[in-house]
Image (cartoon, rainbow, N blue to C red):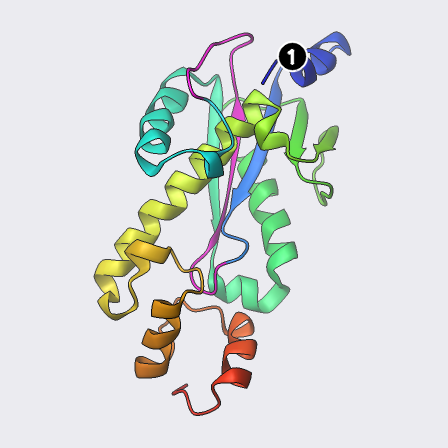
Amino acid sequence: MTWEYEQKAWDNGYSAVCGVDEAGRGPIAGPVCAAAVILPAGIVIDGLNDSKKLSEKKREALFDVIVENAVAWSVSLVDETVIDEINILQATYRAMRQAVEGLTSPADFVYVDGNRSEGLALPHACVVSGDAKVPSIAAASILAKVTRDRLMRQFAERYPAYGFEKHKGYETKAHDEALLAYGPCPIHRKTFLKKFYQKHPEAPR
C-alpha cells in the first residue's frame, strides 16, 4: 500500500484527501456503517490494510491508532428500518455521505472504495479494492468494521438468542436456527429475510 492515490490528488491541488468505506452491506440484521478518514500525509501505520484481512484484535488496536493520528475522522450508521425503506445500496450511499459530511475538519477530495458512488457533493473518485490500495480508505474500512462489530456485540446483550456477537448479523447456520426458533427481532432487515422465508415458510414471523 502506497500513497500513490493521495499523491495524485495532492498534485492536483487538493489538500484534505479523505477515504470512505463501509461495513455491513451483506448481513441480514443490524445497520450499515460507513467511515471517512483524512490521514496526515505520509504517516506510517504498521499493519494498515483492508479490515477483512485483519484479525479482530488487530483491527481493534489499529482503530485506536487511527483515531489518535487522523487529521479528521467520522463514522455514520444507517439502521435496518431505513435499509428496508430505501434499499441497502441507497442506505450505503447515505451512510458514506453522512460520514464525509460529519468530518470534524472538512475534506476537499474523496476516494470511495468500490466502483460506484452517489450523492457526494465533493470531487471524488472510486477505487476498486481501494481498502487494499489507498491508506485513507483502509483506515476508513477499519473504523467502519470495528464500530459496527462493537454495536453488534451490544445488540447481542439485548437479544442474546441470536448470537450476534459471533456472526455480527450475517446469515449462518446458527443464525438461521435462531430465526427458526424465535423469529426475527427488531434489528433484523425484513427485506433481507424474504429468501429465508421462501426456504422456511414455517418459521415464525
Q: Secondary structure at mark 1?
A: loop
| Rendered view: 109 above or below 80 | above
In the image, what residue occupies the spot 62% across and 13% down? Answer: 3
In the image, what residue type sits under mark 1? Ser
Using the image as rendered, state which of residue 5 and residue 133 is in the foreground.
133
Position of the C terminus, as image quadrant, is: bottom left
- Start and end of the magenta stretch? 27-47
| Rendered view: 148 above or below 85 | above
Question: Which picture quadrant has residue 111?
Answer: top right
| Residue 111 falls left or right of residue 62 | right
Using the image as rendered, state which of residue 168 and residue 66 is in the foreground.
168
Q: State the image coordinates of residue 81 (x, y, percent, origin top left).
A: 49, 66
In the image, what residue occupies the spot 56% across and 37% down? Answer: 21
Q: State the image coordinates of residue 118 (x, y, percent, origin top left).
A: 72, 45
| Residue 115 falls left or right of residue 194 | right
Q: State the image coordinates of residue 39 (x, y, percent, origin top left).
A: 52, 17
In the image, what residue occupies the spot 39% across and 66% down? Answer: 187
Using the image as rendered, state which of residue 181 and residue 143 is in the foreground.
181
| Rendered view: 13 above or below 73 | above
* Residue under pointer 1: 15
Position of the N terminus, as image quadrant, is: top right
Q: State the image coordinates of residue 78 (x, y, percent, origin top left).
A: 50, 53
Residue 103 visible in the current orientation = no
Question: Which picture quadrant has residue 83?
Answer: bottom right
| Residue 4 falls left or right of residue 41 | right
Residue 153 lies in the magenta-colored region: no
Total count of labels: 1
In the image, what residue occupies the spot 40% across and 60% down? Answer: 169
